[in-house]
Amino acid sequence: MNRRSFILAASAAVLAPSASRAELIVPFAEAPSRAFIPHPTFVAQQCADWCWAASCSMIFGTLGHPTDQRKVVDFLYSDLACAPAPKTRDLTTILSKSWIDDHGVTFRPRIEASFDQESGIIAINDALIVSELLQKRPLLYANKDHCMVIVEADFIPTPRGPRIIAMGALDPWLPSDQPGSSPYHRLTKAERRPAFLGGDMMYLAAVRI
């Protein structure tokens, strides 16, 4: 996963029991709310192919364990090669093993829920995503060729739970020829849609420590 290129939000259709009914059925609607992390840790990737390592470093740092992205890279490539993470299962391993942070403290993250296109895992929904962000926990995201960190979601409350209508991420890619550029990236509709539904999302994981 180098440069940039699911939400399984239920779409409810309200059907009248009979065509002869004259009453108007109005769908539930409410003003959007926002769940976000006010001060997430940002880490810029140190090479063109290290978006995955920088994103994991952001996750760890925001959760209280700053960890240099080079430690993450060293786990897969002992020579610190500027190379992409080969499989999404490597991301799952990184987010599930013990680490020693930059302060010498040992910690072990765990994946609370995830969507993993390559592994056939669909175990996350809008309610959990919103809950994680409200608890100030970012999520690791990957589209078809780039990793980012989800730090914001706009959602509409419904009787069946929150329905996400937009998401924002921190993008570790900051081109050197664009000084002062913002790392914030608003996900497109395609980036929010799972790959098996014709979108670009390949991976999304809620991480806790």
Image (spheres, grey):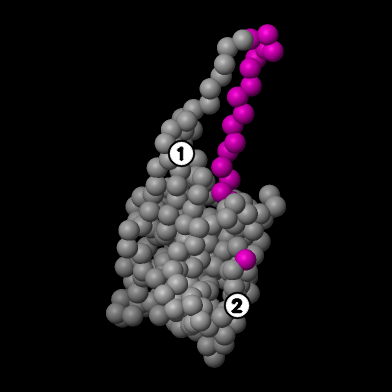
Position in image of residue 152 (x %, y %): 43, 54
Q: Main SS type for the magenta part? A: loop
Location of mark 1 (residue): 156
Residue at (59, 31) in percent of width and height: 12
Say if 19 sits above or below 101 in the image.
Answer: above
- Label 2 environment density (alpha carbons within 10 Å; few <14, some 14–19, many ≥20): many
Residue at (53, 62) in percent of width and height: 141
Disc 2 marks a residue whose amino acid type is: Pro
Q: Image quadrant for the C terminus?
A: bottom left
Disc 1 marks a residue whose amino acid type is: Ile
- Which mark sits nearer the N-terminus, 2 or 1? 2
Span colored in magenta: 5-21
Element type where label 2 sits in the image: loop
Position in image of residue 21 (x %, y %): 63, 10
Please check the rendered image and state whether residue 59 is part of the magenta-colored stretch, yes or no: no
Please check the rendered image and state whether residue 15 is part of the magenta-colored stretch, yes or no: yes
